[in-house]
Image: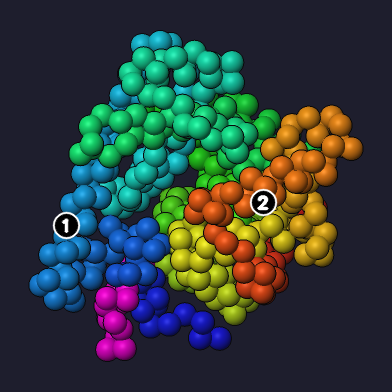
Amino acid sequence: MNLINPNQKCLLDSLANMLFNKKFEISDLVDINEVVAEAKSQSVISYVYPVIKSHLSNDEKESLKRVNRMLTANNVRVEYEHVELDELMQENKIPYVILKGLVSASYYPHSELRALGDVDFLVAKDDMERAGKVLKSVGFVPTDDDEHECHVAYHRVIAPSIPVSIWEMHWEPNGIPNRKEGDILRGYFSTILKDAQFNGRFYAPSAFHHGLILIIHTATHLINSGVGLRHICDWAAFVSKFSDDEFCKIFEKSLKKVGLWRFAQLLTLLSVEFLGCPEKKWAGTADKDYLELMMADIFKGGNFGYKDEQRINQAKLMTNHDKGSVDDNSLAGQLVSTMNEKARLAMPVTKKVPVLLPLGWAYAGIRHLFRIKSKERPSIDVKEMVKGANERKAIYKEFKLYKKDRK
């Protein structure tokens, strides 16, 4: 299909080299500056810099060296904050577990290259209030955000020259759908704190729980604003650590039960095809043209939709947020469903009094217009919204998210 251009191919080959030591040569058709720009938009510049630096001019090399130093400094700060979190929770006898971030990095061959962001952690719902008081005691304040149903974000400003610390405290992982499969997933996660293991710095989830978190997180963001290559690298690094028998023993029955097995297979086939991940028999097969469509979609969006602000609008026409899936609804039907979800979130009273839903629509709509005006949300391009939603829906329906595998 040739949907992946030479610069994107070079970036993928560079990642394969970093992750799995796959050898490659940079083609004369490659514009190394475009590779760098793409790596930044996919949040993987720290992964590929060591691979491509010999092909950069002195000025470009010096510029990227400064970027890499900043990323390294940020990683050191975030790693320290994980230790700080552990000390705070242990001193106050609050069981916790770290989500993503440093846990994902631990599966990489060079863990220091995995860029870190916020500190995400989970505590029991009953411990949320007490843990919040502990965070406030060391300078954190809750971030004003009313759209998260499973976590509370806290931030702390130490000094103008130091990046703001953001800690997200969860009582369950993001992306669990509100359907019977969601209840099953909540059952799986009911032992996440009990099964957590201390790695010398912090409590990390079991391989089973971490794998579940990666799958759910990637699926949720991909069918909304999008994911970057960083997420695919996280999965490739993780899944490569297991033999076929080990992976099937840990995951197959559980993922089939909730309708996430096919998505796990496709993520793995994508990792094999483009990132040099060793082949996995359990992943089955997929048409190579389809895998190229998946990868082209990831390139088009960038990390969390960084390259295409219309993707979050497209999701309103194709993604059932409540079910966590892309269904067979018409675009118009899905828009109505999405607006109902927005109304219930904006005006919780509409959950008990459905007749008030029109007021919820109006309130959510007016609030969205204000957010567009204040640049918090992108303006709506209806033509691009419809076109992009149709294209993405055709790809994502193959994931069969939360459709139970009866084989």
* Residue 25 is covered by the magenta coloring: yes
Q: Residue furthest right?
A: 355
User: In the image shown, does 290 or 71 lie closer to the viewer?
Assistant: 71
- Residue 11: x and y in percent read 35, 71
Residue type at numbered disc 1: Arg
Q: Look at the image and name its color scheme.
A: rainbow
Secondary structure beneath label 1: helix
Q: Which residue is mark 1?
A: 66
- Residue 315: x and y in percent read 65, 59
Return the disc, 2 or 1, that comes first in the chain's sequence: 1
Q: Which residues are magenta?
A: 16-35
User: In the image shown, does 94 or 60 lie closer to the viewer?
Assistant: 60
Q: Mark 2, residues whose alpha carbon is within 10 Å: few (<14), some, or many (≥20)?
A: many
Q: Which mark is residue 260?
A: 2
Q: Is residue 279 left or right of residue 402?
A: left
The residue drawn where x is 33% and y is 70% is 37
Q: Is residue 332 left or right of residue 170?
A: right
Judge whether residue 253 can be spotted in this image. no
Q: Mark 1, residues whose alpha carbon is within 10 Å: few (<14), some, or many (≥20)?
A: few
